[in-house]
Amino acid sequence: MKILITGATGNVGIDTIDSLFSIKNNHEIIAGVRNIEKSKKILSKYNELSYRNFDFENKNTFEKALENIDIIFVLRPPNIANVNKYFLTLFDMMQKKQVSKIIFLSIQGVENQKNIPHYKIEKAILNYKFDYVFLRPSYFMQNLTTTLLKEIKEEKKIFIPSGKLKFNWVDTKDIELVGAKIIQDFENYKNNAYEITGSEFEDFNYVADLLTRTLGFKIKYESPNLLKFFIQKKKYGIKPMMIFVMIMLHYLPRFGKNENNFSDTVRKITDKEPTKLLEYIKREQEKIIDKV
């Protein structure tokens, strides 16, 4: 079978590809990317990986990218929020090219968040009557080394407006190992949604302390007001749409129920225990210290 992975050079996309090759699947794995030559350098260690031009913002890339594809794994770029403009066009082309199987990376609790793109995309997939799997992960540990890294690097602090809000932390490597197992045996998992969580429910004060003890220097946690947060992120060159996404993920949940809704998906599907925060920080320690 031919598997097309969108967003293949992002953190989640790379972990998906890595997991697929690590379990020695028999499928042809195809990276859907905007720049093939640049992507070949990023993904150079995967010699058996194929490439096709795919860009959510260029619908003219959809038809060739979907040619003879059996399953598409959709990883939504954070800046792509207009479901009607981008995703319905993609789904129309999927129908035209007879691509009927889709795995979509959504988020935990999406069923209670009707205003976010993930909810609308899930509903659209159901309306198109594709065979589907919805992966609904909780909060990524990888945010510590991506979207939250700049303040850790320059100011030795985590700067996010979350107050005392707790998160269920999950390693994207666990998410994508689940995804890889599902791709390998899609027929047995199809037409279901799977919440994917870790086993720890902690706030950023706890994480800052864990980073401090592990890295050997003080990392503090500051929860700014929204204006201060917006100004600083804008100063760092982050686009307003992405800032609003960060507010949606880190601030708005403070006004709802803050519950530790753990799942056993990782253990059941991969036969391993979810990664712990300390394990993740130690694994990424050299990278974090180098960047700091």
Image: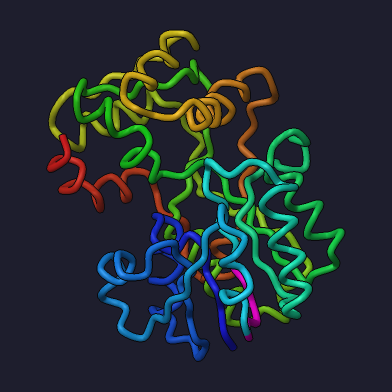
Left or right of 235, for residue 195: right
User: Is 12 placed left or right of 179 in the picture?
Assistant: left
Q: On screen, 103 above or below 252? A: below
Where is residue 220? Give x, y as percent: 28, 19
In the shown orientation, is residue 60 left or right of residue 274? right
Task: Specify whether residue 166 is in view.
Answer: no
Q: In which quarter of the image is the N terminus?
A: bottom right
Residue in view at x 78 percent, y 36 percent: 114
Residue shown at the point (18%, 23%) measured from the top left: 218
Q: Does the magenta stretch include residue 181?
A: no
Q: Where does the magenta region start and end?
A: 68-73
Residue at 72% in and 71% down: 94
- Say which of 265 and 115 sits in front: 115
Looking at the image, residue 46 sits to the left or right of residue 108; the answer is left
User: Looking at the picture, how far across and down is residue 265, in whole percent?
Assistant: 61, 60
Where does the image place residue 131, in percent across and percent down from the top left? 78, 72
Give the tally of numbered discs. 0
